[in-house]
Amino acid sequence: MTTTSAEQAAAQIEAAHKAYEQSRDETPQTRAAWLEALAGGLEQHADELVGIAARETHLAEGRLRFELQRSVFQLRLFGDEVFRGENLDATIDHADPEWGMGPRPDIRRINVPLGVVGVFGASNFPFAFSVMGGDSASALAAGCAVVHKIHDGHIELGLRTGEIAAEALAAAGAPTGLFSTVSGRAAAEALVDHPLVTAIGFTGSTAGGRALFDRASRRPVPIPFYGELGSINPVFVTEEAWNRRSEEILAGYAGSFTMGMGQFCTKPGLLFAPAGSSEEIAQVLGRELAGKPMAPLLSPRLREGFDEALAGVRNAEGVDVLIDGDGAEAPSPTVLLTTSDAVREQPGLLEQEMFGPATLIIQYKPGTDLAELATLLQGQLTATVQAEPDEDLAALLTVLRERSGRVLWNAWPTGVTVTYAQQHGGPYPATTAPNTTSVGTAAIRRFMRPVAYDSFPSAQLPRALQDGNPWAIGRRVDGRWEHPAEGGN
Amino acid sequence: MTTTSAEQAAAQIEAAHKAYEQSRDETPQTRAAWLEALAGGLEQHADELVGIAARETHLAEGRLRFELQRSVFQLRLFGDEVFRGENLDATIDHADPEWGMGPRPDIRRINVPLGVVGVFGASNFPFAFSVMGGDSASALAAGCAVVHKIHDGHIELGLRTGEIAAEALAAAGAPTGLFSTVSGRAAAEALVDHPLVTAIGFTGSTAGGRALFDRASRRPVPIPFYGELGSINPVFVTEEAWNRRSEEILAGYAGSFTMGMGQFCTKPGLLFAPAGSSEEIAQVLGRELAGKPMAPLLSPRLREGFDEALAGVRNAEGVDVLIDGDGAEAPSPTVLLTTSDAVREQPGLLEQEMFGPATLIIQYKPGTDLAELATLLQGQLTATVQAEPDEDLAALLTVLRERSGRVLWNAWPTGVTVTYAQQHGGPYPATTAPNTTSVGTAAIRRFMRPVAYDSFPSAQLPRALQDGNPWAIGRRVDGRWEHPAEGGN
């Protein structure tokens, strides 16, 4: 296996810093063109890349093609956002002798890029959360340089994607070193430790992520560590919804928890449902699961972790096996069953991420206060309710909001669309930075920081803040937003 | 001295959490009314509060009155921001079957409050960065509850301000416990450690701040630590500006570095000026400093730290005393002089914060590359240039932008106005969170985090996100901003 030495990683970080310095003041147009070049490069090599990915990950080709398309779309959406200057949050307060606390000078604020960002690729999304996935795209859109640590699970894909990205950037005129890849543990540690690295984006396990978070926090100059760690993604089914459409709900659940062989960070690992006949549930789920395609898990190491977590939950007191997986190399799904009384006694049951095709149903008694039950949960990426339109669920929704980054209504959490309003994050341990997102256009801002310019003549200001708005971007001026007309830029 | 036990602090944190739960979904109108009540309470007791503050801090009454007025104004400005919903960043993406990466569901995002916030008051601003200062105001505006750790330097003022705040909130109908104060070390540690505390705001020393940052990062559930630590606030005078108006520059400098007896976090502690006659500089500064009022420093402990830091710099090799302070109880200012060659050899000279009336002038040779010289600096709250309008300072301004949160042009960094565009922050060690601000309306956001609502019927959404925009706030809808007409809410 190819690995990068600490020295080589340091050299790449220094080259990235130099490229950052050369390009940090490029126009939005240029930066958007670089993102477009990356999108085009990925598209052009789609067949080759999907082929390598399928071989390295056991993921189905259709799924991989969609994931690549998503990454390509993301680069273009971010380019459009940069072109519009949305990520800059340009704000202008003109000098005001009448300002309420005493005369104010002219103050103008803009977001600037952080510098070199280290990105750790995920095992489970070889495109969307890997080499040219969300973190790389948003950091480059922010104006940062990126050194990407390839996940061990798809080294060949990572190296090839990195080559294609570097070639695309070079052809578009970006400075050499703006994006590069490393692999192996020594390089990973160098990335977190190097003084020129200003932030880390990470998607992976809770244990590994916490160790790197601690390492980033202990630096002489601590840096933000944007880590997506573990999430169990609870689903609450109300009695009314269960009575009306339990079969439909179980069908949706079966589809969602087996997606990507249960290796989605938003996989619904817990379903809270009213007590009832377990035979009926088993029957419906059995029918729904029968048609699902199976594949080996992403890696032997991941499989080992899955087997261990699954055994821990299935052997716990009060947990029954509703549907028994076969434990084959491409394992069939396992569904476990317990009660709300059992999880009250062992709340740790709600904290076991089984990263594979397994899930736990928790049956609650009629009249149970779901909001109170939900307070047992840790931080999550998502929390879902299956309910009827007229139910008053304010209390439950508030508890779920407090514990997650995205709340869903009669939908399923797997599948995270890339949009302006998307939030993919959540309280610890779901992430180490719940006030940021790793998906959607808002992700660009986490690789930027604000700088104010005080009492500057217009000509000496960054162009985004100059009088006359030469970049024709949206700006807040003296407290009121001014947006150029549609198509005005 | 009154101190709070760890048990008592825990009880207050629990009460704050309860109050937070009771009030987290209040309307912007109600929250703005609470901020107005706090502003009114402070105004009503201004004479009493300023009297206590003057006694406890040695600060002049005029300065204290201004600082109180600033705090009152800040509460009202934040109330207005909350009323307009600006802090919510409400974003709506309607379901779109044609979305570029595949059909998207309806996704809507809003910022929600974090929960209970611990705020550590500063020694040097008994109002603006203390009990009802920026961090408390912004956390309450965000919808959080606050437990404030009173600075040991003005306990009586802290307790009285806390009483007035609690009374004002109670009279306005806010839940008991939404705001309270604690004092002493045990309570401080309890505040950082308690599981119900979700963020810390801190203004103080680099050593103390780093210790608490480490403590917050080591928690089982780490929390954001927004610490403002140390800053030296360099000023760069170009040769052209120096030739044209050195006297005017020295006068401004003298006024700025002695403000508040040099106990401002934005005090210009370094002035880079062209080499020239030190007698002339001494003469101009001597004349300017002669008229400045003097007072004892804020506390004996602070005085000790000042004396030590000053001695460290004045005894360093290559440092001369240009103007010798008298070391009296109310010490007259000290101005030290060195060369850019000396600081190149001992860059540590640029990292000594002398928190009192002392500053260091660094003379550079004609033709020196100021941008290159500026790379010796650590992270700063502010960086200033004194220059002529037509000079090309792009390189220097970029280096200063990289190292600070606010860059000034022909102005002085002391005095930080509270506006929409203000940024009071900066790279470590100036702060532990350079992507946030502790001053200005943007500060409200650091006590919030985004939550997305996926596929919700309008009636089940938070009101800020419902169809029809019942709160009449600015929202981004399908990528385009929509702002209600002026006065429309």
Image (cartoon, coloured by chain):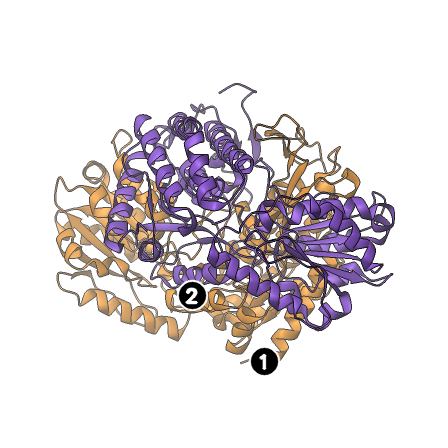
Chain colours: A purple, B orange
Question: Residue A168 at x, y = what percent?
Answer: 35, 29
Is residue B113 visible in the rendered image? The answer is: yes
Q: Of the residues shown, which amino acid type is indicated by label 2?
A: Gly
Q: Are marks 2 and 1 in contact (CB under 8 Å)?
A: no
Would residue B107 be found to the left or right of residue A370 on screen? left
Residue beneath the point at 68% across and 71% down? A346
- The residue carrying pointer 1 sits among few (fewer than 14), some (14 to 19) or many (20 or more) residues within 10 Å by Cα, namely some
Task: State the mark number for residue B209.
Answer: 2
Nearest the eye: B244 or A401 = A401
Q: Is residue A274 above or below residue A246?
A: below
Question: Residue A262 at x, y = what percent?
Answer: 60, 50
Q: How many marks?
A: 2
Quarter location, residue B447? bottom right
Would residue B24 be found to the left or right of residue A197 on screen? right
Nearest the eye: A448 or A473 = A448
Q: Can you name the residue that lies furthest to the top here?
A: A487
Is residue A103 visible in the rendered image? The answer is: no
Nearest the eye: B219 or A149 = A149
Residue beneath the point at 43% across and 48% down? A121
Q: CA distance from mark 2 to mark 1?
A: 21 Å
Nearest the eye: A469 or A60 = A60
Q: Is residue B201 above or below residue B376?
A: below
Q: Secondary structure at mark 2?
A: helix
Chain to which mark 1 belongs:
B
Chain to which mark 2 belongs:
B
Q: Quadrant of the C terminus of chain B?
A: top right
Task: State the mark number for residue B5.
Answer: 1
Question: Residue B469 at x, y = what percent?
Answer: 73, 35
Marks 2 and 1: same chain?
A: yes
Q: Secondary structure at mark 1?
A: loop
Q: Of the residues shown, which amino acid type is indicated by label 1?
A: Ser
Would residue B316 be found to the left or right of residue A346 on screen? left
